[in-house]
Image (cartoon, rainbow, N blue to C red):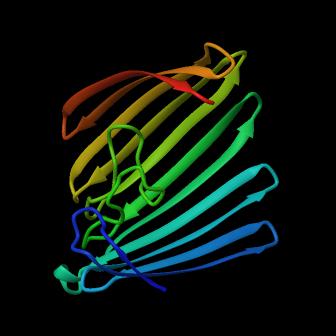
Amino acid sequence: GATQTYISGLTQDSLNAAAIIGSFGPVNASLWYADVSNQLNALSLNVNGKFSIVSVDLTHSTLKLDATGSKTNSLSKLIVSAPVGPVTLTAGYATTDKDGGLVAFDDDASANFQVDQLSLNGTADSDAYLLAVSGTFGDVTASLTYLDGEINTNTDITETLVKASYPLAKSLKATASYSMAEVANADTDKASIALEYKF
């Protein structure tokens, strides 16, 4: 149905949305479509499943802003993971269209492909690979993630993220992270410590 909404600075208008969701054996699939009249239309297809110990997740998302005419942004990503001994190994690949890769108004959206500092959302003619290892060792949950790619045709990017979490109490957890990113030979570091309390 149609409702009144306000999306990230866009003018108020009618929003129409529809979804098709289903499962076929070990495969789950969903197709989402949204249209904001005189503003945009968006489509996202996700197919995921677990085959033996290997999990596969494929997403293709598109966003077309009416103001850009026939230009359609798209971002496709594939994530594969599997447990190996005490750790989980993850590999990923993503690519964006030459017209643009804007598929979400928030980089934290599931349609995006990012580590911590770097993101493919909003970049055109880009692609990136991701490798990660994670596991729980005693009370500590830790992960190491590495991304390598190219954005906007010819700008090289890399990022390495180290993250660790430790329970300080039954409902209190501390998480520390450190990221080193490089975009076109310009380096940036980012460190953070967060406390999470669950009621």
Front residue of 151 and 66: 66
Q: Position of residue 63 (x, y in %)?
A: 34, 74
Name which residue lies at 69% across and 24% down: 136
Q: Position of residue 98 (x, y in %)?
A: 26, 70
Looking at the image, residue 173 sits to the left or right of residue 145; the answer is right
The answer to whether any part of residue 72 appears in the image is no
Instruction: Tell me: residue 130, above or below residue 95.
Output: above
**Which quadrant of the view contains residue 11?**
bottom left
Q: Position of residue 152 (x, y in %)?
A: 22, 58
Instruction: Tell me: residue 16, above or below residue 63.
Output: below
**Which quadrant of the view contains residue 71?**
bottom left
Name which residue lies at 22% across and 64% down: 9
Counting every numbered tag in the picture gives 0
Front residue of 197 and 187: 197
Front residue of 5 and 31: 5
Looking at the image, residue 155 sits to the left or right of residue 111; the answer is left
